[in-house]
Amino acid sequence: MLFDAKKFAHKYALIYTALLAVLLIVPLLTYVSILLQIDEAKVKLDLESQAQKIIVSMQHYKNSERVYHFPKYKEYKSALYTDAKQNIYTDLDFEPESFVEGFHHQGDHYYYIYPLPDGYYFGAKGLLVATQHTANSIYLFAFSVMIAIVIALFIFSLLLLKNFSAPFERLNNQLDDFIKDSMHEINTPLSIINLNADLFANKYGENKYLWRIKAASKTLATIYNDMEYLIKQGRVEHKKKYIDMSKFIQERTDYFQEVANLKSITLHIDIASDVYYTCSKTKLQRIVDNTISNAIKYSHDNTNVNIFLKCLSDGRIIFSVEDHGVGIESTEKIFSRYYRENEAKGGFGIGLNIVKQITEEENITINVSSLLDKGTTFTYTFPNK
């Protein structure tokens, strides 16, 4: 009912994949950095070698020859320039930003500046040899390895976690089946108790002992309905209907009257007539029943519980329940599943968690105001639809 093995496996497979990927990708990035340094060193060595070839070619040139054919290469560009950085010869397809001796990197252009001695090589002061080069193959390799690592880690983690969660899934299914069977078995005697209590009251009249029986059965019925809602959650679609909220809340208030009588609590109602709202009757009942039953449960004896309903001018609906009881110390925690602020009052701590889920699904706003030993007010604002 509460354990989703598939969701569990996917969620933690992603987490473990991310953690392990970080640990493995760090050395991969170090390796890629080294590859880039090696690649750059290779380019530098090639440019130096090419510069030496051009210098050798110029050294072999004889002044008696009329024309010097400057060596040209498909992968390399070159230039000769004077002290004033004026070109004597160039076939470059870019403008160098620096003419300092040594190796330079400009965009995807790598070039090498080699100084020339005075009085030689056609009066040139320097030789520039350049090539276009990218490290795309290295980046592609790194990206491919990274993707392969992530995919492999995710598949491995998913398979591992699925096997790990299998026993929990079987146990969860068994527990789910047990709860379903138990709920079915509880429903029958609960119906019999309520039916016979009503028959007894009609025949012999009401008394305090009968009130206790009815109050206890209605408290048990509220817990039963919460459990049934949880079991069916995500499996059953709760269809929305056009509901007369005025009539509905009045009926639910009457339902809990006997529970209130047991503590001599008076239920004061201020319910506007003809207030309608479109929603699931099941969901609305979980909100109303949990709020009213909690107000009665945590109120002091011989006090009042005020139940209020009205429709605002903008179409929004306000439903509030005010009690005069123990109050709430941690209003931010009460909607957590299994949280019980007062262990002595019993319950499973699931009612308000269900209420919170429903209000989030239906965009209903909850406001809880409370003072210790003074009382608590739950206010629900239903949006205009």
Image (cartoon, rainbow, N blue to C red):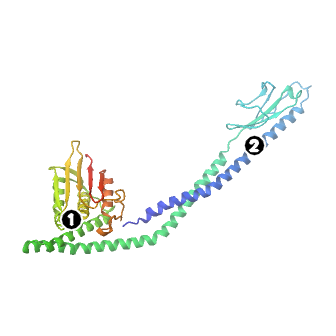
Residue indicated by mark 1: 301
Q: What residue type is labelled 2?
A: Val
Image quadrant holding the N terminus, namely bottom left
Quarter of the view holding residue 174: bottom left
Q: Nearer the viewer, residue 53 or 291?
A: 291
Task: Indicate left or right for 230 with 152 as reference.
Answer: left
In this view, 145 is above or below 174: above
Q: Earlier in the sequence, mark 2 or mark 1?
A: 2
Cα separation between marks 2 and 1: 90 Å
Residue indicated by mark 2: 43
Task: Indicate left or right for 179 with 73 as reference.
Answer: left
Q: What residue type is labelled 1?
A: Asp
Q: Nearer the viewer, residue 212 or 198?
A: 212
In this view, 203 is above or below 52: below
Q: Could you tell me residue 7's position as x and y percent? A: 43, 62
Which disc number belongs to residue 46?
none
Q: Nearer the viewer, residue 346 or 254?
A: 346
Residue occupying image coordinates x 63% and y 54%: 26
